[in-house]
Image (cartoon, helix red, strand yellow):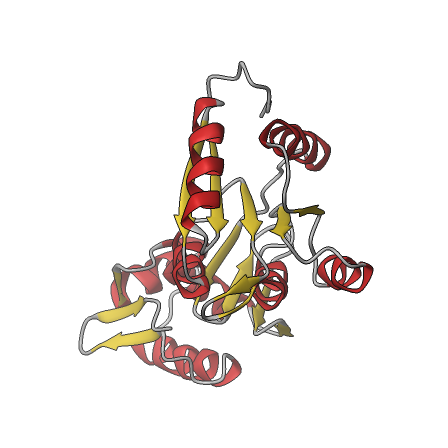
Amino acid sequence: MKYESESREMIDLYYAEDDETVAQAVKEYLEQENFRVTVFSMLAGMKQALRSRQPDLVLLDWNMPDGQGNELCGWLRARWPWLPVIFLTVRGDSHDVVGGFQKGADDYVVKPFELEVLHSRILALLRRTGQVKVNCYHCDSLTLDMDKMSVFCDGEELVLSQPEYQILLLLMENKGKTVTRKQLLEKVWDSNGNYVNDNTLTVTIKRLREKLHQPACLKTIRSFGYRMEDTL
């Protein structure tokens, strides 16, 4: 993906900022430069949006009404290590700058700033990172990384059997939708020529729940199937 001003493809950006004047100025300028900017006045709103969809880049203010941007940066980095993050804040002493980078920021811009300079730094960061998204699925504190074939709960890597991983992948791919027991049996076992009875699925789901620390986001739809949905 090319990130130049003349690019026809819009750049999707999330911006956490509680100062309406600053937020509006940044939003108006970047939207003229082919960005789609979503402003969040609270960190909780951005956190919820990130669970559903990840943008091309995140701008973070440090001091927000419901928390500190550096904590959100650490939370975000543990789940989406590829996602570029820039701090945009009045906190400019060396201790804060170092702290921001330690939490996972890719760049740090101190207010006040020139909009043209901010725009240039955003484009430079996107070119540098190449914006290569890994194939990850998320639900509450669970992350499934398809590239690594790994599963994490709150950053801790879990060890799953092949059927457990395949079941979780199918549920994650269809998050918000109910996957029937028949579909799971057909896709996890029957497609490989391994025909098993219904009880095998019940036992595998039980073991998967235990390994995932009994997640509230894994719902049982009685006598029908299972569904993954965010609860946090």
In the image, 154 versus 44, the foreground residue is: 44
- What is the x, y in percent for residue 33? 49, 23
Give the position of the N terminus as an image quadrant.
top right
In the image, 111 versus 3, the foreground residue is: 111
In the image, 232 versus 222, the foreground residue is: 232
Residue at the image point whose x is 38% and y is 56% from the top: 187
- What is the x, y in percent for residue 215? 42, 80
Q: Residue furthest left?
A: 223
Answer whether residue 10 is visible to the viewer in this image. Answer: no
Residue at the image point whose x is 38% and y is 65% from the top: 195
- What is the x, y in percent for residue 125? 68, 36
In the image, 223 versus 6, the foreground residue is: 6
How many badges with numbers are in the image? 0
Residue at the image point whose x is 70% and y is 63% from the top: 103
**Left or right of residue 64, residue 188 in this image:** left
Where 160 sits versus 117, above or below? below
**Left or right of residue 64, residue 81 in this image:** right
Answer whether residue 25 is visible to the viewer in this image. Answer: yes
Q: Residue furthest top?
A: 6
Residue at the image point whose x is 40% and y is 44% from the top: 38
**Left or right of residue 231, residue 138 in this image:** right
- What is the x, y in percent for residue 209? 44, 81
Give the position of the C terminus as an image quadrant.
bottom left
